Image (spheres, rainbow, N blue to C red):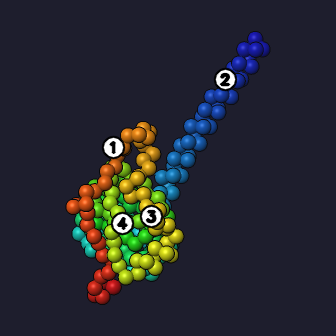
């Protein structure tokens, strides 16, 4: 009987541990969701938010975005031109948009975007099912922004994407492809003074 009591005690301890792990996971998931929501809705001086816009042309100057996290969410048929060096970009739920950005010093997260075009350079890009071409954005302070961004311009993996969801090293990932040369576009962040 005593050993049976110990078994019940051990069994109960294991059940409690499982509940603790499950609850911990739920709490961590909740904090992740809250963190992402807080990031996108933040009014911090270090965050720039663009949300819930339709058919708009938006220009950002370096003073607007330098060293800041930029969040874009729920945009349709917008064109955003961002000169400067944002710290990170969080882009979610865009449809039919064009986003042209100077070099981003850290990461860019793109989620739930459809029929969009992005011209950006960054340290790390999180996205799914995209086509890639070399960064082809020109503007007056481009060389200065590249130097200030901390990106090593000689290291360029636009055509050698590391796909964490593709585990077969000798087979090209079906999750990304390159844009053919004749389809590639060039962009400019230099805008007329009336937009500044």
Q: Residue at x 41, y 40 (%)?
A: 170
In primary-sequence order, the first of circles 2 and 3 is 2
Q: Quadrant of the N terminus?
A: top right
At 34% from the left and 49% from the top, the residue drawn is 176
Residue 90 is left or right of residue 113, and the answer is: right
Badge 1 is on which residue? 174
The span from disc 1 to disc 4 (Cα, nearest Å) is: 22 Å
Q: Which residue is mark 4?
A: 135
The crowd level at tag 2 (other Cα within 10 Å; few <14, some 14-19, many 20+) is: few
Q: Residues within 10 Å of mark 1 (few under 14, many from 20)?
A: few
In the image, which is nearer the foreground, mark 4 or mark 2? Answer: 4
Label 4 or label 3, whichever lies nearer to me, is 4
Q: Residue furthest right?
A: 2
Marks 2 and 1, the one that precedes in the sequence: 2
Image depth: mark 2 or mark 3 in front: 3
First in residue order: circle 3 vs circle 1: 3
Image location of residue 107, percent across then percent down: 47, 61
Q: Position of residue 138 (x, y in %)?
A: 34, 75
Which quadrant of the figure contains the C terminus? bottom left
* Residue at the (51%, 47%) spot, across then down: 29
Asked if disc 4 and disc 2 are in contact, CB closer than 8 Å, the reply is no
Q: Nearer the viewer, mark 2 or mark 1?
A: 1
Sequence-wise, which precedes: disc 4 or disc 3?
3
Determine which residue is flagged by label 2. 11
Query: Can I make out residue 44 in this image?
Result: no
Q: Are the two marked residues, 2 and 1, in contact with CB atoms closer than 8 angstroms?
A: no
- Which residue carries the number 3 mark? 122
Disc 4/disc 3 C-alpha distance (Å): 10 Å
Kindly state the secondary structure of the residue where label 4 is placed.
loop
- Would you place residue 94 above or below residue 138 in this image? above
Label 3: element kind: loop
Comparing 72 with 18, the one in front is 72
């Amino acid at each position: 009987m005593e050993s049976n009591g110990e078994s019940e005690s051990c069994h109960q301890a294991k059940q409690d541990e499982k509940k603790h792990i499950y609850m911990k996971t739920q709490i961590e998931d909740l904090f992740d969701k809250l963190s992402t929501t807080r990031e996108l809705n933040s009014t911090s001086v270090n965050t720039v938010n663009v949300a819930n816009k339709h058919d708009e042309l938006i220009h950002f100057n370096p003073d607007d975005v330098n060293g800041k996290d930029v969040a874009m969410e729920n945009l349709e048929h917008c064109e955003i031109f961002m000169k400067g060096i944002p710290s990170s970009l969080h882009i979610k739920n865009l449809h039919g948009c064009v986003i042209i950005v100077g070099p981003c010093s850290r990461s860019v997260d793109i989620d739930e975007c459809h029929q969009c075009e992005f011209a950006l350079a960054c340290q790390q890009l999180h996205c799914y099912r995209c086509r890639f071409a070399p960064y082809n954005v020109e503007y007056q302070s481009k060389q200065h922004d590249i130097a200030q961004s901390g990106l090593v311009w000689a290291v360029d993996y636009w055509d050698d994407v590391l796909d964490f969801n593709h585990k077969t090293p000798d087979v090209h990932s079906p999750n990304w492809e390159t844009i053919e040369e004749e389809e590639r576009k060039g962009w400019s962040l230099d805008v007329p003074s009336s937009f500044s």
